[in-house]
Amino acid sequence: MEYLLTEKGIALGQAIALWVDKKIKKIYWTNEEIDQWFGKRSIKEIIKNGTTCFMNPCFDLTLVSSYLLTQNNINNTLVIEEHLPTKEFNFNRLHFALDFIDKTGKYHINYKNENAVYINHGEYQGRKDLPQAQIIKISGALINPDKPLYETLNHQNLEKLLKNITTEYSLEKNLQRLKQDNTQENYSKYKQKSEEELSINSKPKSQPLSEFYTELFPRHV
């Protein structure tokens, strides 16, 4: 019985990820669009626009996922993981994931890679392959879908929010590297590597209830 209950929670996470993948397409943004949109849109603006950058899409995808859960009265928490510098990136970076809890237990949704999502039992514990500075948690119930996250958290802009909640994160350095890597060549490589369908990784893998849960969401958005 415990296995079957867990299976329902995993199926709910899968349905969330499938809906988000269908509505929010990962595409090439110009550097001007990155400056205009990256981390600065409300949830409803993300959904209306229907796109996110093919690089670092976890922020937008996780926010929309949180909104879907909140609209269906499912408790959820936005998880912000701050990574310390590495050999490849000599500055702190951020990753976003989502915890949620229903009658069957605790689960998390992690848009780990550009076209892969991990949905598993238990709270998100962070990446084991990267050094961690801290984890910050924000209740999904506090996130206003009509405002950018920085306005919801009472800050004038994204840079001031990040300066206040992180240890050594630099928005300027992260955007500079993002735009440096934002080439048509890298986008072509992404398209070649990515499967046409979203790769969903979860345990257990067989979830017959996913299609049922998917039907819950469109009417709320």
Image (cartoon, helix red, strand yellow):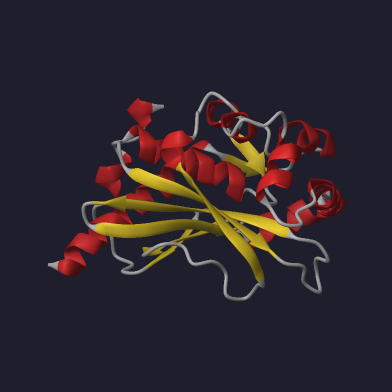
Q: Position of residue 20 (x, y in %)?
A: 47, 42
Q: Residue at x 68, y 33 (%)?
A: 40
- Is 1 above or below relative to 101? below
Residue 146 seen from this side: yes
Snapshot quadrant of residue 28: top right
Q: Where does the image place residue 188, in percent across and percent down from the top left?
A: 75, 54
Q: Is residue 38 visible?
A: no
In the image, is residue 28 above or below residue 7?
above
Name the residue rendered at 64%, 68% in the picture.
132
Please state if 195 lies on the left or on the right of 13 as rendered.
right
x, y percentage for residue 148?
A: 61, 30
| Quarter of the figure that contains the C terminus | top left
Q: Residue at x 54, y 31 (%)?
A: 43
Q: Which residue is more in the foreground, 190 or 150?
A: 150
Q: Is residue 141 left or right of residue 104?
A: right
Quadrant for the N terminus, please. bottom left
Which residue occupies 62% across, 76% down? 129
Taking depth in this image into account, of 185 and 56 the one nearest to the observer is 56
Q: Is residue 187 left or right of residue 198?
A: right
Image coordinates of residue 193 in percent, x first then y, are 65, 62
